[in-house]
Image: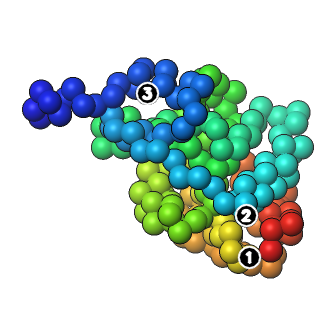
Amino acid sequence: MSVLAQQSKLSVADYLAGEDGGEIRHEYLGGQLYPMAGASRRHGLITVNLGAFLRPLVRATDCQVFANDMKVRLRVAGDDVFYYPDILLTCDPADRETYFCTRPCLIVEVLSEQTERTDRREKFLAYTTLESLRAYVLVAQDTRRVELFRRENNWQPEIFSDSAMPLCCLEGELPLDAVYEAVL
């Protein structure tokens, strides 16, 4: 690698410092920054609905739920990577870094035209390398469709459009009416 290429990479420490209080959020892949796209009204409502549904379920547990602003840190092909999932659930009491999680058990991404390819391919492949991850969920925002990928099911997709989806890491089910309340 050339000296110029090495100098253009941002360190993890500099990235985290820049994100702290920054107006624009960035995902970080191996020293490179990628600005986050803005979210639609539907995207925002779905994310709030999910967070609101999950919040009461984590009370009196070791779990914590985050919407939009908590990063997940992982290593991909030897590089540090930080993503901002739409919903992140961690139930490991040792997973308590200030600005990121490293051991989530559930990650949810709300799909958009701009992010769907990345969410389905790049992020899916990266997230499923996390030993702690039990489920990855993709939520459509223009139709009632939730895709659940579970470790216990070899990451094969399970599609939900009417019925409730089983919750991984927590007891119970997630009704699609709660996901899409005031959205569709």
Mark nearer the N terminus (2 vs 3)? 3
Cα–Cα span, label 2 and label 3: 29 Å
Cα–Cα span, label 1 and label 3: 36 Å
Residue at screen point 75% across, 36% down? 63
Q: Amino acid at mark 2?
A: Arg
How is colour applied across the structure in the image? rainbow
Callout 2 environment at 10 Å: few (<14), some (14 to 19), or many (20+)? some
Element class at badge 2: helix
Element class at badge 1: loop
Q: Amino acid at mark 1?
A: Arg
Q: Image quadrant for the N terminus?
A: top left
Q: Which mark is residue 42?
A: 2
Q: Amino acid at mark 3?
A: Tyr
Residue at screen point 44% across, 50% down? 126
Q: Does residue 130 appear left or right of residue 163 in this picture?
A: left
Residue 133 visible in this rendered orientation of the protein? yes
Q: Which residue is mark 3?
A: 15
Callout 1 environment at 10 Å: few (<14), some (14 to 19), or many (20+)? some
Q: Which residue is mark 1?
A: 144
Mark nearer the N terminus (1 vs 2)? 2
Mark 1 vs mark 3: in front: 3
